[in-house]
Image: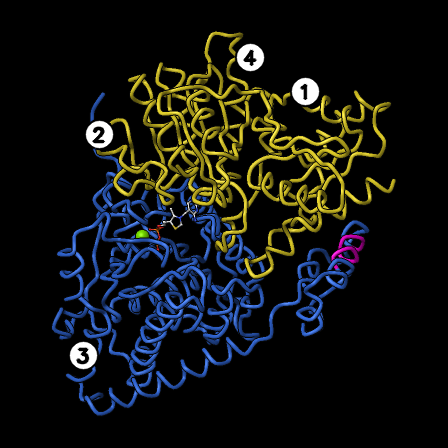
Chain colours: A yellow, B blue
Amino acid sequence: MNLVGAVNEGLRQAMAEDPRVLVLGEDVGVNGGVFRATEGLYKEFGPDRVVDTPLAELGIVGASVGLAINGMRPVCEIQFDGFLPTVMDQVICHMGRMRNRTRGRYSIPMVLRAPHGGLVHAPEHHSESPEAYFCHTPGIKVVCPSTPEDAKGLMIAAVRDPDPVVYFEPKALYRAAKGAVPSGPYETPIGKARLAREGSELSFVSWGAMVYTCLRAAELLAERGVSAEVLDLRTLTPVDIEALLGTAEKTGRVVIAHEAPNAGSWAAELSSLIHERAMLKLKAPVRRVGSWDIRMPLFRLEKYYIPDARRLVRAAEESLAF
Amino acid sequence: MSLRTVAESRVQRLEVLGENGKADPSVDPKLSPEILLKMYRTMVEIRAFDEIAFKLQRQGRLGTYPQILGQEATQVVPALALEPKDWLVPTYRGQGAYFARGMKLRYSLLYWGGDDRGVHFPEETNDLIFAIPVGSHLTQAAGLAWASKLKKDGAAALAYLGDGASSKGDLHEALTFAGAFKLPVIYLIENNHWAISVPRERQAACETLAQKAWGYGVCGLQVDGNDALAVWRAVSEALDCARSGGGATLLECETYRLGHHTTADDATRYRPAAEVEAWKRKDPVLRLKAYLEGRGLWDERRDADLRARAQEMIAEEVRAYEAFPPPNPLDMFANNYARAPWALIEQRAELEKILRESRDLEEVASLPPPEGRFP
Ligand SMILES: Cc1ncc(C[n+]2csc(CCOP(=O)(O)OP(=O)(O)O)c2C)c(N)n1
Ligand SMILES: [Mg+2]
């Protein structure tokens, strides 16, 4: 099964087990979503539970907040990562803080889904990696799977979670990532990372589609006799601090790879955590490899913007030579 | 105590051309042959371009492309009605409007081919780059018009939007400003009845989108958007109103997206073929052609000639598009700031080093020199 199929199966099983779950967003119903993530759900669950909304992102998220407060379990979709900025008013001012502002009286058990990342030759504003804006926001959880198995398990965990979860779907992996997926409902625990490759001399830390770039870089390093491991965070907040510090302390050399510009990125936060808590085990400063601190260019230049395996190997070699 | 009516509004619809191309003399703007022929020529050319661009995408020679098939009148005519100093603020489905303003079609191809060099407007007109996040340009158009008002330069702003975009909060805020400050701005809704797979009726419960204007103290009018003469008349009157201090207008131009949403979409998944067929009978190009023939301004021979010349012009644009050298990756770093900060200077140098070291060396050596302002 591919990753978009796993998202779809996760949604279907979450809807089947809980009648409060509803899916809403632009083109998610009759059309099954522009990536087909909600394909078939409209037929199976009907127009009250799979809702084609008007074109109004802030309305979609604000209404989901209200639906969640009043007992529903909305899973809303924002069609592309590039259209998330407009919903930040609801995310920051309400979704993330309703539980705390009401001193626990109201909670927001909702999921906000959005595609993530580039390298699919998409138009402008369709290849963004805005996770840091969300991770910076208190009161929400942020996940980003890289395998079909985790995509399904994290979807079910996100829907069942009592707090708002932002669920990023790496669009480069929708069809490219394939793998076996258990057939029944199951959870991939939120807050737990996955060791995608074991190694001893250097650690790549990553999430989403960049995990595969790290795996390729680890291959290239292996050819040069360097043993690198790859930690797939899966959850960005709350980050799996044990796994993060564990790999840092084990190899002493960390390269954090991601698709967003480095400045103020989630990689910057992870780097700080490692430096603050594992400083004396490090053999080199933690390196961040992200996109340049400029906007995502149109797609003909995206391969020079988003880090590739060679850039990761360069950073690894600098770390090894430190 | 009483219950009485304190305000009332009504929605009017403007139609000039019948489906047979006959004009109603009471509303015919009686345009000069020169303008009529320019309108028609531009509509035929952009339709021919649209078809070729679609094929280029299918052949892998272009990225995702949004067709304008069926919307030629609403695309081209408003842009032709503007003066160069007026601000044109199109949407991503706007290549017809840019073309009518004088932008060469090779740049539309470059843009949808994933190349930032495709953003290239004529020097002499005020054209804004379109916004991909739907509706986010609407308040900006209010600001453009506001500045013109403050500067007293006599210019107006014309912003396009879709029926889908009319649901965004942005329109509410844009009309609020346009009304409150009596701004010389026109919001032109190209109601093509679909926002990807979501039909017009799902966007709003009101019978027309034009009536949204009344809530903001702005004039509203529904227009047959497949009727080039009605569009011309409506836009011209709205421009007169804007220029004479009368404030803003919201025009709902009813048209139809005959093609898919973009080349990435498959419209057969969500809409009936019969609906598409019914709209083909209201084809804006054919209706204008029939009108021109009725006035003795046009015939089949001239039409064949125009189409042949359009094909040649477009073939030349495609050649020019494909003859552009690949973009230099270092161009990404240009024009980010008036003066690039240290981080960008460092990062550009790093990319340059990577490019020189990499196995793409030959590819890199063949690149044109970097363009744009840096640092
Ligand atoms: C804010 C935002 N949300 C979603 C999208 C994705 N999207 C692109 S076009 C479109 C439909 C727009 O419909 P409409 O405004 O009617 O314009 P049309 O495409 O019909 O010209 C959608 C949902 C977007 N570009 N921006
Ligand atoms: Mg539309």
Would residue B129 appear left or right of A216 to someone viewing this image?
left
**Distance (Cα) linking label 4 and label 3:** 66 Å
Would residue A225 appear left or right of A48 to someone viewing this image?
right
Q: Which residue is mark 3?
A: B291
Query: Would you place residue A67 above or below residue B21 in this image?
Result: above
Q: Which residue is mark 4?
A: A100
Q: Residue at x 24, y 38 (%)?
A: B205
Of discs 3 and 2, which sits in the foreground?
Answer: 2
Do the CB atoms of the residues marked 4 and 2 lie less than 8 Å apart? Answer: no
Query: Could you tell me which chain the residue with mark 3 belongs to?
Result: B
Residue A131 place in picture, x, y as percent:
58, 35
Q: Which residue is mark 2?
A: A46
Per the rendering, the mark at residue B301 is none
Magenta span covers which residues? B345-351
In magenta segment, residue A299: no
**Distance (Cα) linking label 4 and label 1:** 24 Å
